[in-house]
Amino acid sequence: MRWTFCLLLLIILTSCFVTEKTGTSFYKIDLKLDVNRQLLNANVDLTYYAKKERVDILTFYLHRNLSIETLTCKNLVEYTFNTEDPCAFPFTPEAGTLTIHLSKPLQKGEALQINLQYVGKIGVVTQWEINRITKEWIELGMYTPWFPYQPAIENFTYIVDVKIDPEYQIIGMGKTKKLDDYWQVSQENPTNDIIIMAAKEIHTKKNQRNGLSMDISYTATSDSTAVDMMEQGLWILDNYGEWFSDIKAYKASIVIAPRNIGGGYARRGFVVFNHFEDEDYYQNKIGYFRYIAHEFAHIWWLNAPTNTWEDWLNESFAEYSALMAVREKFGNETFKDLIQAKRQKSKNMPAIKGIDRMDENASTVLYDKGCILLHELEAEIGNDNFLQLLKRLIINKVKSTEQFLKVLTDLSGIEVSNKFEKKLSR
Ligand SMILES: [Zn+2]
């Protein structure tokens, strides 16, 4: 396949933790984009909630080409913006580190209003070549990062008002609307990125089924291919809704970015591909389908922590959900081939339990071996019970293996549960 998937990026970015209803950090941003000069100008009001006791130093990442004009907040001693040293966060290598020192520490849950204004030319962010301001295509997200980004915030909401040359159209992750002389992108469901994209001519197709809606945006792909991809996505959502649980009024999106490099990435319910030829799509249709199915499955499979081995509760389940979708759509033979390939890859792999998330085998263990275990469990307890199990895990927002085993015990008995627990350890 021509597009490359950067598994590491997906691991850290596609899942998230559950945040309490109160205390979700919020960004209100006025963003001006001057495409001709590749300039970005932002005025950010961030309502930041401390997640720990006694926070007196806050650290954010921001692209090092951006120069901070003002920064204000209560109890500010000073701020520094280090653009010389390498960035400590691996996914934003071109970021500088903004450090804010407070004279009075924040208590856990306490809010702090921070305003900052900055301007700069980012052009193409070279490390991943995903984010960019070019005449043909604008794509901004945390890889730049174009907004003050702190990985520890994990979940936030936002409203971004974007002013851009009137020839351009804006799309983004969230609700997007055109107002008088600006565009507004807003996100009410907590997420971990702010994605803004623009081009002169963006085509969008939409459809909905059973209360779920799906859109696809593209500039250079043929209408028929885009519609086909959107229909696959909607089919996946519809089936998941039936299998796992209904999510009312959910909107998922796919964007096909007109760039040949940089690869794709995904956030919850939001999948980005780089450019592909129609022929490539139809030749690898199952591959594209599986990828979308895996990413959309995270709309449901997201509750376990992503930085420990318990991430198998996100990744193995999302991957097996994708295979279930393949089985339903493309038949049992295709499904069996995929299972067989995963079985081969799983040979001599370490145990799921305790695998270090940074281990070189972590993705094979979580995506392949975990899938095989779920397949064996489905064969053991039967399809109906297995679907029942999936439903109960989702309803109970299960986020640990201990909770998972309890749900399994309740449904299928202690013997099945003990057997599965042993398999997790070998
Ligand atoms: Zn995943």
Image (tube, rainbow, N blue to C red):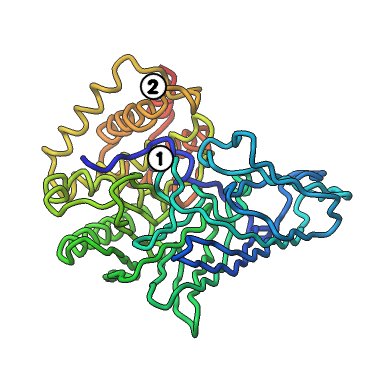
The residue closer to the viewer here, 237 or 132, is 132
Label 1 CB, ligand 1: below 8 Å?
A: no
Q: Which mark is residue 411?
A: 1
Q: Quadrant of the C terminus?
A: top left
Residue drawn at 47 percent across, 37 percent down: 404
- Which percent across, then down, holds residue 340? 19, 27
Callout 1 secondary element: helix
- Which percent across, then down, holds residue 170? 41, 70
| Amino acid type for the residue under numbered disc 1 | Leu
- Which percent across, then down, holds residue 280? 15, 47
Q: Is residue 294 above or below residue 362?
A: below
- Which percent across, then down, holds residue 119? 61, 60
Q: Quadrant of the N terminus?
A: top left
Return the residue found at the far right: 103
The first of marks 2 and 1 along the sequence is 1
Q: Is residue 235 above or below residue 88?
A: below
The residue closer to the viewer here, 257 or 230, is 257
Which of labels 2 and 1 is toward the front? 2
Residue drawn at 17 percent across, 52 percent down: 277
Q: Which mark is residue 322?
A: none
| Amino acid type for the residue under numbered disc 2 | Lys
Disc 2: which residue: 423
